[in-house]
Amino acid sequence: VGRLLGLQSGFGPKAIIATAKEFGVCPYELSLELSEHCEIIVADYNYAFAPLVKLKRYFDNPEGAGRYIFLIDEAHNLADRTREMYSAELCSSDFAGLPGMASCEGSELHKALGEAAARLRGLRRLCRKDLTYDEAGLEHGFYIARELPEGLDSPFRDLCREIEPRLFKTGADPTTAGLAPLYRKLLRFLTVIDCFDESFLFFCRVEGKKTFVSIMCLDPSEILARQLDRIQAAVFFSATLTPLDYFSDILGGGEKSETLALASPFDITHLFVAAVDNISTRYEDREKSLPAIIAYIAAALSGRKGNYIAYFPSYEFMERAAAAFSAKYPRVEVLIQKKGMSREEKEAFLDAFRAEDSKMRVGFCVLGGSFSEGIDLPGSRLIGVIIVGAGMPGISNERNIMRDYYEQNQRPGFDYAYTYPGMNNVLQAAGRVIRSETDRGIVLLIDDRYATPKYAAMFPEHWRHIRHFTSPLALRAAVIDFWKG
């Protein structure tokens, strides 16, 4: 630490790792020790909020209460991240085929493993009322409750107590290293159980021979409020905190919080914003709407050669649209996002968006995916975005449970679970276009919901000049005019 403090006043990963190697110490432990000499620490949300990862030397120390200020960037992500941090799941398959367990037969560890696995399998009975069979004769069922089954945690705590000393004692049997993944899952599950209250849900489901047990955090506001009460102040900031009342609520601000909406720092005349409000992109309408969507994408591209991204609500819809567009406009270069892309594949995808190469290029991507947030393609590397749909997350059991929870607590449940997160996806994708004072570009929204008062109320102030179109020819003329201007 002394060496680092004497060299510089800021410490990135390279400097910490190099010093740790030189002195033969753990880089992570060195960074923790070093942090106590720093006034500013830059870190992931986990280190302030996650129950198993947060820096206890700061936030669980009574003497440190009120000493710290949080500056929380990209705050629109914090609610879902907190739900994830405070949710956990176990599956019956987690206890099957563990390496080295044959040698432990008859031991207390083997007994604890059997009891924990039996407890998890036994929870299948909770799903009996909602059990169905598929064509292959496999069982499917679920059970939802606002309370935990009595004694749920006991066998899992016993198993943790058996595993822990075997993992961490000096000269541990190498075969027990195979228990580490299970131990981590158990530890997280038990930590989340300890936080369980009225804002959580117990969820059990059966899929064939597997039984899944989940603890779901539905409402992160109380958890965040408790964390924020331990510090002096917190400033949440993001370009997409819309609507502000919603984010103030779910981020634990409540009535004590102050909100401030600042105008865009960029010239609003540099951004052409348009909405096509005579097309439905709802799931049941997508097939018949596809030809018109392709026509509007072509109209948006017709004003200037360059790089564009078209965002879609699902991979399936995106792939169908990309195929239809390529068939109709074969001279336009088409790039398609793939599921599970590696870091190198993502970098290659973005590198294809080159500046000033006089080509017509359009990327087909999924809204809410890795290319709709956190990427920077300034200047002519990206001059337009087309957003198909309203950005809402796919319908799921988890989202529906969240919707019902907020309805029961006198909030607009559908908006909290679907509408507002969807609009945030839209605003994040649209924000890829203007990245500097000199950038110019277009944003096209395709969905009839953008003509409704609910969605208009969520548009940011710098979209006040949005124009609505019902004809690809009219849109094409307006886009050409914008680029001429």
Image (cartoon, helix red, strand yellow):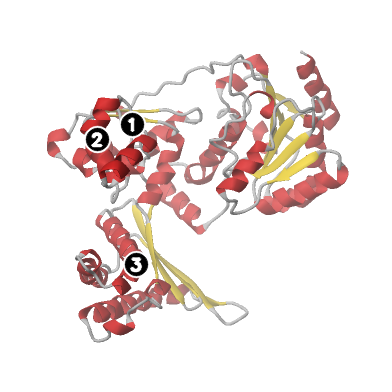
Indicate the amino acid at tag 3. Answer: Leu
| Pointer 2 or 3: first along the chain | 2
Local packing at callout 2 (Cα closer than 10 Å; few below 14, some 14-19, many 20+) is some
Q: Secondary structure at mark 1?
A: loop
| Pointer 1 or 3: first along the chain | 1
| Residue 451, placed above or below residue 205 | above
Please name the residue that numbered disc 1 is placed on: 11
The residue under the point 39% across, 32% down is 248
Q: Quadrant of residue 316?
A: bottom right
Please name the residue that numbered disc 3 is placed on: 182
Residue sitting at the far front: 22
Left or right of residue 339, residue 263 in this image: left
Spatial CA span between label 2 and label 3: 32 Å
| Pointer 1 or 2: first along the chain | 1
Spatial CA span between label 1 and label 2: 9 Å
Please name the residue that numbered disc 2 is placed on: 34
| Residue 187, placed above or below residue 270 | below
The residue under the point 81% across, 25% down is 303
The residue under the point 50% across, 27% down is 239
**Residue 246 seen in render:** no
Q: Secondary structure at mark 2?
A: helix
The label shown at residue 212 is none
Which sits in the foreground, 213 or 201? 213
Residue sitting at the far left: 63
Cβ–Cβ below 8 Å for labels 1 and 2? yes
Front label number (2 vs 3):
2
Spatial CA span between label 1 and label 3: 35 Å
The residue under the point 34% across, 54% down is 200
